[in-house]
Amino acid sequence: MIFNKSESMTSPVSLQAYNTFHIDASAGRLEMIVETSRLKDIIAGGQPFHIIGGGSNILLTDDIPGLVLVNRLRGYEMVDKTPDHITVRVASGERWHDFVLWSLSMGYGGLENLSLIPGTVGAAPIQNIGAYGVEVKDIIVAVHALDMETGEEVTLRAEECRFGYRDSIFKREAKGQYFIIAVDFRLTLRNHRIVDDYWAIKEWLAAHHISAPDIRDISKAVIQIRSSKLPDPEVLGNAGSFFKNVEVDKEKMKALGLRFPEIKAFEMPNGNFKIPTGWLIDQCGWKGRRIGEAGCHKDQALVLVNHGKASGREILRLAKAIQADVEERFGLMIEPEVNIWP
């Protein structure tokens, strides 16, 4: 169905097409947001609402009886330029991967390792998305948002966003406080920083006989690696990695290493260690298992999937069973990366 800016759907509306798990929950009313003035009117009216971007990082466990807004804000704008860098303001409703491809077509560097991540630009700072040695916090200059109480526009500098591993102020103390309308990114025009430290990228480059990769080579590598590991949500409902990787301190890592000599871990710049949660789940025997229509993907244990008609509650029950097994075996509590609604 095609929406114009003044159109909305009421009573009730299926949200199956608006979440990548393809959960058939419903909303009492659905409206597309294509301009900030309309959002300000809704905020001023005092009606509560939920917001969906790309729908790639939510799990709907029940119907949403009230208003659901779908972010369709669009646009790119250059806001600053130096000989080495350009700062681009991108509307929050733009698809993230489209933005990455656009930046590469312009010759701008910095986003190539973040290729093929699902979702919208507005979700990027909330999650502090990251992949293959790069986190979006290192590229963000500022986040522009509407205060959900006052309807006033505010700007948060990167340091005010309190970015952490798959974390930000928007997921913690400011959760629900802001609607992100645009994000400023500082990209390189020359002397691009090539991040190819991950073994999977190194293997891809070696297989393609590329010894001095450029930003497009890195993007191609990441796209092919991700495509080979992760299921297409259009074919098999999923929200990408369901759980965050686990971060532990040096003492905890030492104790785990004594109990599990085969455990995989990567030392981080802060001295802590990152343990791949997919490996933990796989060791507990969950990879490829399913309970009814909900399952753990056969190739990537971090990805929970909807095999057809699973409800959000069924997928959540599966997630909790996996959490319990990992905690029992390793003494580690794995946290969901997706947002659980409502």
Image (cartoon, rainbow, N blue to C red):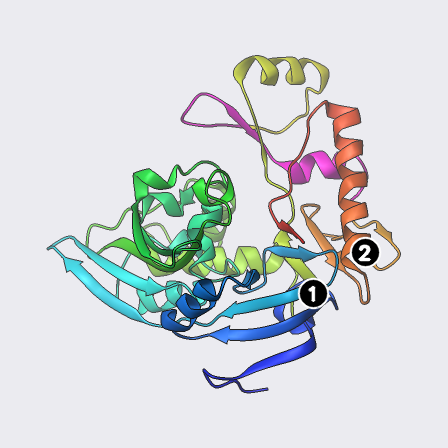
Residue at point 42%, 24% (across, down): 270
187 relative position to 111: left or right: left
Image coords of residue 290 (percent x, y):
84, 52
Query: In this picture, which residue range is highlighted in magenta?
Result: 266-286
Crowd tier of the residue under label 2, counting other residues whose Cα lies within 10 Å: few below 14, some 14–19, many 20 or above: many
Whichever of callouts 1 and 2 sits on the residue coming sooner in the sequence is 1
Instruction: Establish if 224 lies above or below 281.
Output: below
Q: Is 111 placed left or right of 130 in the picture?
A: left
Viewer-nearest of discs 1 and 2: 1
Is residue 145 covered in magenta? no
Q: Which residue is at 73% across, 24% downward?
A: 330
- The answer to the question of whether label 1 and label 2 lie on touching residues, with beta carbons closer than 8 A, is no
Residue drawn at x 68%, y 55% is: 59
Q: Quadrant of the N terminus?
A: bottom right
Residue topped by disc 1: 65
Height in image: 233 above or below 32? above
Instruction: Answer whether residue 131 is visible to the viewer in this image.
Output: no
> How far is disc 1 from disc 2 in space, using C-alphas?
24 Å
Residue at horizontal 76 percent and vertical 57 percent from the top: 312
**Badge 2 element:** strand
Residue located beneath label 2 in the image: 294
Name the foreground residue: 222 vs 325: 325
Q: Position of residue 142 (x, y in %)?
A: 29, 50
> Disc 2 marks which amino acid?
Ala
Measuring from the top left, give residue 57's x and y in whole percent. 59, 55
